[in-house]
Image (cartoon, helix red, strand yellow):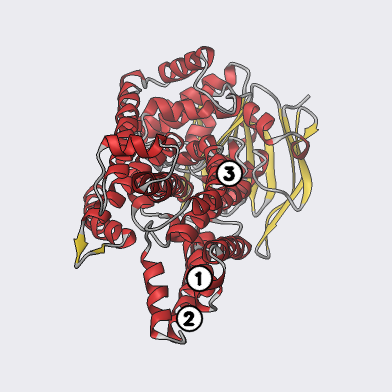
């Protein structure tokens, strides 16, 4: 059974149709790259997958159950969501920030149980943040903050991770680093769904590709078979070239020919 | 965190010392022996009257109101993620002021002793209901609705002053607006304390949600926080606390703004952990200010508590703005 599925999902906001009858299903262990031009509905789809917006039609299911029927807290324990450019509003320490990811599992009052404190330590280690754990989150660089936010999601040990442009604003090294971590999470059997603008990174790391255009699914399938010059031209309205060397692929676009 | 525990212990000790000092200090200075005698003496004499009927309720109110304002400031700053938020922001204190002023204006306060505080509470609850009804659904819309409710209530107060039938009526309203704890009795304690306690319990229950809100609204929602319910919960808690505080003591500024800033560095800036220490230091601040206002006399007249906190608080506000300007890019 697919871990996460959407069927005929339609979302309208302010008179515009952001998603128009989108259907898709994602199995556990997949790393799904959601691609498409600005305004195609990527962020809306991810927010709907995370259960953060109520669709106008259709539904999102997790292991066959509608998200609407899963309680907030239960859902929060099973899936993590990272919005675009997540920020921390107060200068709290990195360790505390990461511990916030445990909130859905905490008792209503009292401190952090020892077993959960260990999960914070492991998440900090997994994201190379142990040396920074006492530092105020507001003083981190973009790459460090992205790592801290990822560690925040790992602390909650989610089955599903939904990340909206996790590489936005990162330099090539940190972007690559992020992708390696997300790939590792998928290989552990979690489902990772990420909106990506860097198609070369998407081609190299994702297992599946979902292309959106104007709120509709243009293509969905295994990345290697789906990411073709033809699909990209249809999705982005630009001439594209995909050069493959083994597993990796380089994608570049050319300015539309003058008409 | 060890530093936080030590700071809380120091704050608690300071509160006890100031509470004691608050019983000693005033126009008539009492010795500790007088106070002890006044508290224990079976039959009323001057010392016991001063201690039991005047200074004790006043000190209890200062602690309760200071704690309520500190707690509300911390909760609102956490909810709005804005260090400049204060308990007056959502229109609650203006609503309370309008209610009490109307009680004075229509002469109810002269006939029924508790008319001003009771109508103040009604005004606070009405103002917060209006703020929520208009501003629900978003943080910014709630701040704007609070500003609109504040100015509406402020206009009502000005109108009452405008049409005050006598100069002494206007004077009475002005005096009340300045905020004071002078001549408050156990009846005021009995009226305000239950509301403050319930409001404080409601606000204390929001600690975890306020912590998660450090990550922004989208992440907080993904971690299971119901944002609409959180906004409503904080507003109800603030309405009960600030409504009760303002209706008994008038408008007292700056305590709610300042107390969270004093404790934030000590508790590591996490909004939820700021709540209770902020209440403690709010109580310390207001108790100290009340003692100060009693001792600073001009022509035999006490300086009003609200005026005193504003005088002391304004320079702090300048410092805060300058510091924020330096920290912000």
The answer to whether B77 is drawn above or below residue A209 in the figure is: below
Q: Earlier in the sequence, mark 1 or mark 2?
A: 1
Q: Circle 1 marks a residue in which chain?
A: B
Count of numbered labels shown in the rendering: 3
Q: Circle 2 marks a residue in which chain?
A: B
Examine the rendering and report whether any part of residue B238 can be seen.
Answer: yes
Q: Earlier in the sequence, mark 2 or mark 3?
A: 2
Question: Observer-nearest residue: A189 or A213?
Answer: A189
How far is mark 2 from mark 3, CA to CA?
31 Å
Dot 1: few (<14), some (14–19), or many (≥20) neighbours within 10 Å?
many
Residue to which mark 1 is pinned: B98
Q: Is residue A135 left or right of residue B93?
A: left
- Asked if the residue under mark 3 is in contact with the one under mark 1, i.e. CB atoms within 8 Å, the reply is no
Q: Earlier in the sequence, mark 1 or mark 3?
A: 1
Q: Is residue A1 left or right of residue A41?
A: right
| Mark 2 element type | helix
Dot 2: few (<14), some (14–19), or many (≥20) neighbours within 10 Å?
many
Residue to which mark 3 is pinned: B198
Name the residue located 53 percent from the left edge and 60 percent from the top edge: B142
Residue to which mark 2 is pinned: B160
| Mark 3 element type | helix
Q: Is residue B303 left or right of residue B197?
A: left
The answer to whether B47 is drawn above or below residue A126 in the figure is: below
User: Same chain for marks 2 and 3?
Assistant: yes
How far is mark 1 from mark 3, CA to CA?
23 Å
- Asked if the residue under mark 2 is in contact with the one under mark 1, i.e. CB atoms within 8 Å, the reply is yes
| Mark 1 element type | helix
Q: Quadrant of the N terminus of chain A?
A: top right
Question: Observer-nearest residue: A14 or A200?
Answer: A14
Q: Circle 3 marks a residue in which chain?
A: B
Q: Position of residue A161 (x, y in %)?
A: 59, 30
């Amino acid at each position: 059974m697919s871990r996460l599925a959407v069927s005929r999902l339609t979302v309208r906001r302010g008179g515009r149709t952001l998603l128009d009858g989108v259907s898709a299903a994602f199995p556990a262990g997949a790393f799904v790259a959601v691609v498409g031009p600005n305004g195609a509905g990527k962020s809306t789809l991810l927010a709907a997958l995370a259960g953060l917006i109520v669709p106008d039609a259709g539904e999102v299911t997790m292991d066959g159950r509608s998200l609407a029927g899963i309680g907030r807290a239960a859902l929060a324990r099973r899936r993590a969501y990272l919005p675009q450019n997540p920020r921390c509003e107060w200068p709290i320490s990195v360790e505390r920030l990461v511990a916030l990811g445990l909130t859905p599992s905490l008792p209503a009052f009292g401190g952090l149980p020892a077993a959960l404190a260990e999960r914070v330590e492991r998440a900090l280690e997994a994201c190379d943040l142990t040396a920074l754990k006492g530092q105020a989150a507001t003083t981190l660089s973009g790459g460090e903050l992205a790592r801290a936010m990822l560690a925040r999601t790992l602390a909650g040990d989610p089955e599903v991770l939904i990340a909206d442009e996790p590489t936005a604003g990162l330099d090539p090294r940190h972007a690559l680093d992020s992708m390696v971590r997300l790939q590792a999470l998928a290989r552990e059997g979690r489902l990772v769904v990420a909106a990506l603008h860097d198609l070369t990174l998407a081609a190299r790391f994702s297992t599946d590709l979902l292309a959106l255009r104007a709120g509709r699914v243009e293509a969905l399938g295994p990345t290697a078979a789906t990411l073709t010059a033809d699909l990209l031209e249809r999705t982005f309205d630009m001439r594209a070239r995909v050069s493959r060397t083994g597993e990796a692929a380089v994608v570049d676009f050319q300015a539309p020919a003058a008409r | 965190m060890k530093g936080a525990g030590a700071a809380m212990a120091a704050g608690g000790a300071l509160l006890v010392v100031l509470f004691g000092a608050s019983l000693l200090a005033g126009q008539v200075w009492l010795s500790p022996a007088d106070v002890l005698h006044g508290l224990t003496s079976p039959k009323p004499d001057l010392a016991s009257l001063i201690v039991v009927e005047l200074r004790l309720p006043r000190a209890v109110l200062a602690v309760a109101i200071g704690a309520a304002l500190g707690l509300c400031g911390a909760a609102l700053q956490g909810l709005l993620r804005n260090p400049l938020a204060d308990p007056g922001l959502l229109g609650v204190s203006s609503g309370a002021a309008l209610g009490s002023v109307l009680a004075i204006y229509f002469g109810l306060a002269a006939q029924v002793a508790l008319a001003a505080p009771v109508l103040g509470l009604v005004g606070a609850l009405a103002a917060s209901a209006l703020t929520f009804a208009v501003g629900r659904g978003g943080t910014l819309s709630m701040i704007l609705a609070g500003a609109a409710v504040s100015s509406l209530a402020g206009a009502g107060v000005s109108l009452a002053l405008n049409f005050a039938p006598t100069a002494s009526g206007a004077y009475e309203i002005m005096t009340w607006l300045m905020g004071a704890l002078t001549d408050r009795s156990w009846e005021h304690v009995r009226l305000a304390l239950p509301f403050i306690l319930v409001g404080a319990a409601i606000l204390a229950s929001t600690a975890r949600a306020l912590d998660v809100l450090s990550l922004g609204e989208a992440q907080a929602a993904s971690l299971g926080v119901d944002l609409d319910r959180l906004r409503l919960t904080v507003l109800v808690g603030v309405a009960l606390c600030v409504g009760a505080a303002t209706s008994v003591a008038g408008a007292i500024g700056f305590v709610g703004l300042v107390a969270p800033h004093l404790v934030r560095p000590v508790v590591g800036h996490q909004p939820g952990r700021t709540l209770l220490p902020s209440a403690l230091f709010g109580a310390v601040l207001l108790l100290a200010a009340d003692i100060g206002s009693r001792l600073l006399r001009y022509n035999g007249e006490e300086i009003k508590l609200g005026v005193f906190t504003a005088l002391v608080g304004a320079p702090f506000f300048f410092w805060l703005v300058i510091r924020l300007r330096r920290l912000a890019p």
